[in-house]
Image (tube, rainbow, N blue to C red):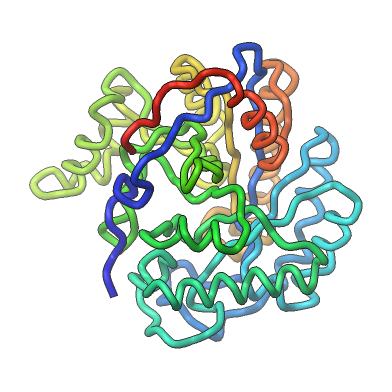
Amino acid sequence: MQASSRPTVLMAEREEARAPGDLAPQLLVVLDTEEEFDWNAPFDRDARSVEAMEDIGAFQELCDEFGIRPTYVIDHPVASQERGQRLLREYAADGRAVIGAHLHPWVSPPFEEGVTSVSSYPGNLPRELEARKLEALTETIEEHFGRRPTIYKAGRYGFGPHTTTLLERLGYEIDLSACPAFDLTADGGPDWSRWSAAPYWFGGGRHLLGIPTTGAFVGWLSKAGPALHSAAGRPPLSWIRSGALLSRSGAVERLMLSPEGYEPAHHLRLTAALLARGVRVFSFSLHSPSLRPGCTPYVRSQAQLERFIRSCRQYFEWFLERLGGEATTPGELRERLDTHRTEPSQPPTKA
């Protein structure tokens, strides 16, 4: 089994999804909705508990308060168990949320591959095995939610060389897998370090819309961010601890629009930097188990959970009320950008 190659060869060509000039900044909220497991332990096929799904209500209520319809991209343990489905069915039926698919290979049938770090990235699987796992997940979601998902996010951001074709075959329209500024090759995953945070069209006929998780290098050395962070992780510079010194100096920071490991000040710096580069679409992301203390490294106590939710609230208030942005969903955004494609566009760029 081969580790994923650079995404620049996974999507041979892509076309920037240009936004209307008067488009207000757009905010999507995406939850990787999954089982609880020990993030510091090897992957375990038997770790399928979804008890933390009972605690997602507080976050949904926060989204309701701001008119945000979050996108829950759900994996097989969530999609196949009543405890995982119950609240999500209610939210989706009421029009308060959107359901997509999220493939964690090690807990998604059929179980034919060995469980390793490399195989945890779905794009590393043999073509037919990735296909059968995604088909099974898609059908399970359709069975229990009454609608076939059209939004996909690869588990661990593991988009692979066959994923585009599989998404097209199964009727998907939107992919959320890209993770700009992050190189996962040391663990067997893709290298997204030079990927743009802007949406893009890809696939046959440029029918698929890619909406990256919002991440970027910011700071006065941001253009050199990928090379500097790569060098900082190798001897003799490994003492920098993955660029911590670079971040503290203000030269370059690698930031993600997430409350997991990032503070409100990071969110505002990242958003301001990307707005200055012309990015109009922002994807705020988190993992559903973080909404129950003790399930992820980011939230270990009730006090940390309260701070976590407060961090989300601060960003939503700033983006939607002070910045003048708008909440949207992947499907709504796709329709808007697709309509704008009727105007002349630039030729596709090599990804």
Total marks shown come to 0
Residue 17 screen position, x and y as percent: 52, 30
Q: Nearer the viewer, residue 9 or 311?
A: 9
Q: Residue at 59% across / 59% down in the picture?
A: 300
**Residue located at (18% from left, 46% from top):** 239
Q: Quadrant of the N terminus?
A: bottom left
Identify the image quadrant of residue 144. Answer: bottom right
Residue furthest to the right: 94
Q: Which residue lies at the image location 61% right of the left edge and 55% below the top edge?
A: 172
Q: Is residue 13 left or right of residue 129?
A: left
- Please identify the quarter of the rendering in which residue 142 is found: bottom right
- Quarter of the picture containing the C terminus is top left
Say left or right for 247 vs 101.
Answer: left
Residue that extends furthest to the top in the rendered view of this protein: 22
Q: Is residue 143 left or right of residue 196?
A: right
Res 301 seen here:
no
Front position in the image: 10 or 252: 10
x and y, in percent, of residue 29 in the image: 66, 42
Q: Residue at x 58, y 32 (%)?
A: 282
Residue 60: x percent and y percent?
79, 49
Q: Is residue 266 visible?
A: yes
Please provide percent x and percent y for residue 233: 20, 48
Q: On screen, 329 above or below 60? A: above
